[in-house]
Amino acid sequence: MSNQENRPSPRRREKPSPLRPVLIFFVLLVLTIGAALLFFPPGDRQLSEPEHPAPPAVETPLLPQEPPDESAAVPDGEFMPTPEADVAEPEAAQPSEEEILADRCAALAGRLNGFFDHLDKREYIQTFNLEKPSREYFIALSYRLLDNPPVVSRESDDLYTILKNMAHFFRIIGKDNIVLIKTILDRERDKIEDVAADIYFWSTIEGCDRGLFGFSPELAEMYEYAGFFLNTMGGRSYLFRRDSRSRLVVNYYSVLLLDLANEKGINRHGLDIAQVLPQLVEEVESSNKLIYKENYLDRLYSLLEKYP
């Protein structure tokens, strides 16, 4: 085979298209106009534009800007706004002592009224036919007891006084009311500690609006019953016939009333609180029936330091 056969055939030259020169001319024209607009912006072509046109928007630089110098002097008469973080919020007005007392009294009265409303809805209470709301009934019963105090001092001078004290509640309020109270202590055992605390604070805080809850005993009257439970055979024998929780709660608040009587200077029987504290502390420590046992012990320990 000859070399002429192996040589590739020459490529056929394409015939130039008549549209190519037109396209090249059009591209050059566009580039020329764009360059003219870029380097020679129009000046006074638009006579209707304002004399001071708004500056064109400037793209925010990517590099962080330096913070302004806060130490720079502020011109006289010019106000420099304070950053929001440095503006101190106005303090809320603190409630006055009168407002705090009113709120506390209202809370105590609300809980006590709520408890007696709860009693009125209980079926076992309705079986006693009280003929009036339980709150009114028990307040009247309480005043009857306060108006007829037991013997606190010199109880053991004669047997008649001892027997009279042992039957004190039976003589003053009667058997039916004793049964009613015992029933409530049993059916509402989980609420008794809260109710006892509310009654104590309501009765000893000065300045409460007594119209919120119509019971306002005098400290001297409650002191007589505190001495009765802590210092007489009749009072102690009555408590020992009750359940341990009720007995300890009554003794605890009797001690608090006796301490308050000492502070007010009305311990007219000269009762010695230091004689009853150690035994009460021991009984509370060994009890597993009290919901607020630790609170009671904290207060009793402080009284042990007060009455060594």
Image (cartoon, rainbow, N blue to C red):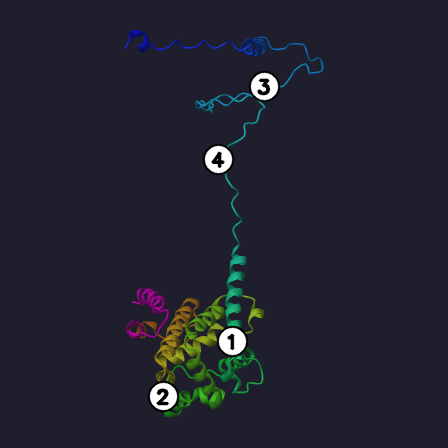
Point out the frontmost of discs 4 and 2: 4
Please tell me how crowded label 1 is: few (under 14), some (14-19), or many (20+) other residues with Cα within 10 Å: few
* Residue placed under numbered mark 1 in the picture: 118
Alpha carbon distance from label 4 to label 3: 35 Å
Point out the frontmost of discs 4 and 3: 3
Tell me, yes or no, whether the two marked residues, 1 and 3, touch with CB atoms within 8 Å: no
In the image, what residue type sits under mark 3?
Answer: Pro
Q: Residue at x 51, y 45 (%)?
A: 91
What residue span does the magenta drawing correspond to? 280-308
Q: Is residue 51 left or right of residue 182?
A: right
* Residue placed under numbered mark 3 in the picture: 56
* Residue placed under numbered mark 2 in the picture: 157
Alpha carbon distance from label 2 to label 1: 44 Å
Picture disc at residue 179: none
Residue 54: percent from the left, percent from the top?
62, 19
Q: Quadrant of the N terminus?
A: top left
Alpha carbon distance from label 4 to label 2: 78 Å
* Residue placed under numbered mark 4 in the picture: 86
